[in-house]
Image (spheres, grey):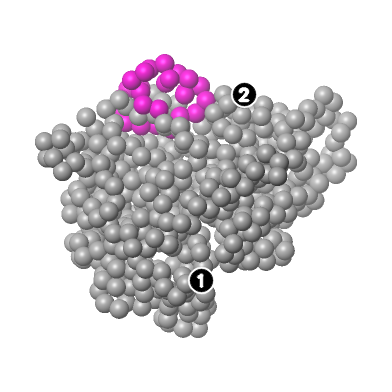
């Protein structure tokens, strides 16, 4: 075994241990969770109080967890709602509304015991029927949520989704505190999937006021409750003192909205102490590093920044054209020039730390080293005929603009002119991604759960709502279905590697880089715990200010 193969195997095994061992330890009690709250009142009394001020780089499209698809909405949803389970900062599955659980019949049945002290923000106690209601509504909403393929493993779920039945036989409330979920067959990622934000629990009586109303006046059971929302300006939350895991230290959170990712304004407000935190990129990181009092966090995240092609657009139906455009970009040069080496170039789709990661993708490595001394002479006749191309981006920050300009310059050397279109309203951006006019788009994908299927199925399955590339391959669809049912972790990881090779051969996307979590905090901010799933997944329950 070569060192390269040994490294690959170590990555696979470590990731498999990370995401599969803990769900089988289903007897964990909520009381066993680590907490930073001291039992000594004298040590904690100075932690309470204050309004935390954080930026959102775009206006969320909704705050209903069933419909949220952007990271800006997820950031707020994480504070307002809880699910049955949640992820620790180290990506272990730990209790939330479920006090404990048991896996029975070799993982075909899950028995959850709910907490007795959990309430919605409207004061009502949470019972088993709330779980059934919240999960059931996910089967008939439009667009279908990313969690749906996981939930369809529940007995009777497919028939309910197809409106052949009006109840789901696999969801049973034994009593107010005991819930049983029966699957059609054992399915390893199921418990992990219940940690996705779409599986947050919502009160039926609040949804009766209308889904549109609920989307802008959400009621959950998380550590903070909704106060107000000024579109493109501010979202205000206040602490939920009756939170089952203890009242938050903060009195509330003000999310200041910067449509289009106005990082210069965010940076200015952070320097003026208007904000308590901010994301950090490129030159801003260098400027902030001079101040030794500023707290800086850098952590790899399970994410991918890429450019997607509309494979059904006549200009880009030919994969050879997509390949030429991809090979014109030197990722190493881009990361070095634009992001000052902050990120790791993307060699495949699945990021490091997950089963299926390809640490040395030879094709991408060749692309990275390629130089175009006389690129015009190497352009195919097919590429010369496509005319001007358009890239659409939701973010208009200085860094995204510099990155897009770099791409435009690279393609200009091929004789291709590029128009850049910015749509900073997320809802409008999503509509454009689904339109026939879409050509190429800039997109960042953050994992909802620590599982490789969460990258490949949502982005490349033919029937996925997030497959904005309109990529279709029957072989890939079958491999995706087979992979999620594989119990051998090594074989499953190898399947995801093969999937990536198959997908990348047709170039529906240009993987650029793996993002990291890079944030700066004012010196008085305490209790920050960032997950590899991204800063937008973090709870502020135990954050406090001096």
Q: Is residue 110 left or right of residue 445?
A: left
Is residue 48 positioned above or below 126 on the image? above
Label 1 residue SS: loop
Q: Which mark is residue 186?
A: 1
Front-lying residue, 150 or 373: 150
Task: Tell me, yes or no, if residue 178 can be seen here.
Answer: yes
Q: Is residue 353 left or right of residue 500?
A: left
Q: Which residue is mark 2?
A: 337
Q: Is residue 127 left or right of residue 444?
A: left
> Which callout, 2 or 1, points at the residue further toward the start of the chain?
1
Task: Tell me where the magenta segment starts and ends, as one range.
Answer: 270-296
Q: Position of residue 206 (x, y in %)?
A: 28, 65
Q: Nearer the viewer, mark 2 or mark 1?
A: 1
Q: Residue at x 56, y 32 (%)?
A: 343
CA separation in Å, label 2 and label 1? 48 Å
Q: Position of residue 50 (x, y in %)?
A: 20, 35
């Amino acid at each position: 075994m070569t060192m390269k193969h040994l490294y690959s195997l170590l990555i696979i095994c470590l990731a498999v241990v990370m995401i599969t061992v803990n769900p089988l330890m289903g007897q964990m009690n909520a009381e066993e969770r680590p907490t930073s709250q001291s039992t000594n009142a004298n040590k904690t009394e100075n932690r309470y109080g204050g309004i935390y001020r954080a930026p959102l780089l775009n206006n969320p499209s909704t705050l209903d967890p069933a419909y949220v698809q952007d990271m800006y909405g997820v950031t707020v949803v994480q504070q307002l709602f809880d699910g049955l389970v949640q992820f620790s900062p180290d990506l272990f599955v730990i209790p939330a509304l479920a006090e404990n659980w048991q896996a029975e019949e070799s993982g075909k049945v899950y028995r959850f015991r709910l907490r007795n002290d959990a309430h919605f923000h409207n004061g009502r106690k949470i019972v088993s029927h709330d779980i059934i209601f919240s999960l059931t509504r996910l089967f008939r909403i439009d667009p279908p949520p990313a969690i749906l393929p996981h939930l369809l493993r529940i007995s009777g779920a497919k028939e309910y989704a197809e409106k052949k039945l009006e109840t789901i036989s696999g969801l049973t409330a034994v009593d107010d505190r005991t819930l049983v979920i029966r699957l059609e067959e054992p399915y390893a990622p199921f418990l992990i999937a219940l940690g996705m934000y779409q599986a947050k629990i919502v009160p039926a009586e609040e949804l009766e006021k209308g889904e549109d109303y609920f989307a802008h006046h959400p009621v959950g059971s998380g550590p903070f409750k909704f106060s107000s929302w000024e579109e493109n300006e501010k979202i205000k939350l206040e602490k939920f003192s009756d939170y089952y895991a203890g009242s938050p230290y903060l009195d509330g959170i003000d999310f200041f909205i910067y449509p289009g990712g106005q990082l210069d304004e965010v940076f200015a407000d952070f320097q003026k102490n208007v904000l308590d935190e901010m994301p950090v990129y490129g030159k801003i990181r260098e400027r902030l590093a001079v101040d030794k009092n500023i707290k800086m966090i850098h952590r790899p995240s399970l994410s991918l920044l890429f450019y997607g092609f509309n494979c059904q657009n006549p200009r880009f139906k030919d994969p050879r054209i997509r390949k030429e455009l991809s090979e014109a970009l030197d990722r190493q040069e881009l990361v070095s020039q634009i992001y000052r080496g902050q990120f790791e170039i993307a060699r495949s789709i699945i990021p490091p730390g997950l089963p299926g990661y390809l640490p040395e993708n030879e094709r991408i490595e060749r692309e990275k080293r390629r130089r175009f001394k006389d690129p015009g002479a190497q352009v195919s006749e097919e590429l010369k005929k496509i005319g001007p191309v358009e890239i659409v981006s939701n973010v208009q920050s200085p860094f995204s603009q510099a990155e897009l300009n770099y791409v435009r310059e690279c393609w200009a050397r091929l004789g291709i002119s590029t128009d850049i279109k910015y749509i900073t309203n997320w809802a409008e951006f999503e509509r454009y991604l689904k339109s026939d006019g879409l050509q190429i788009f800039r997109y960042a994908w953050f994992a909802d759960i620590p599982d490789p299927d969460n990258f490949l199925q949502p982005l490349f399955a033919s029937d996925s709502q997030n497959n904005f590339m309109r990529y279709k391959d029957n072989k890939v669809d079958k491999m995706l279905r087979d992979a999620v049912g594989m119990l051998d972790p090594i074989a499953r990881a190898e399947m995801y590697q093969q999937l990536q090779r198959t997908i990348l051969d047709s170039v529906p996307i240009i993987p650029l880089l793996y993002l990291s979590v890079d944030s700066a905090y004012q010196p008085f901010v305490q209790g920050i715990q960032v997950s590899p799933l991204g800063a937008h997944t973090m709870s502020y329950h135990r954050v406090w200010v001096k």
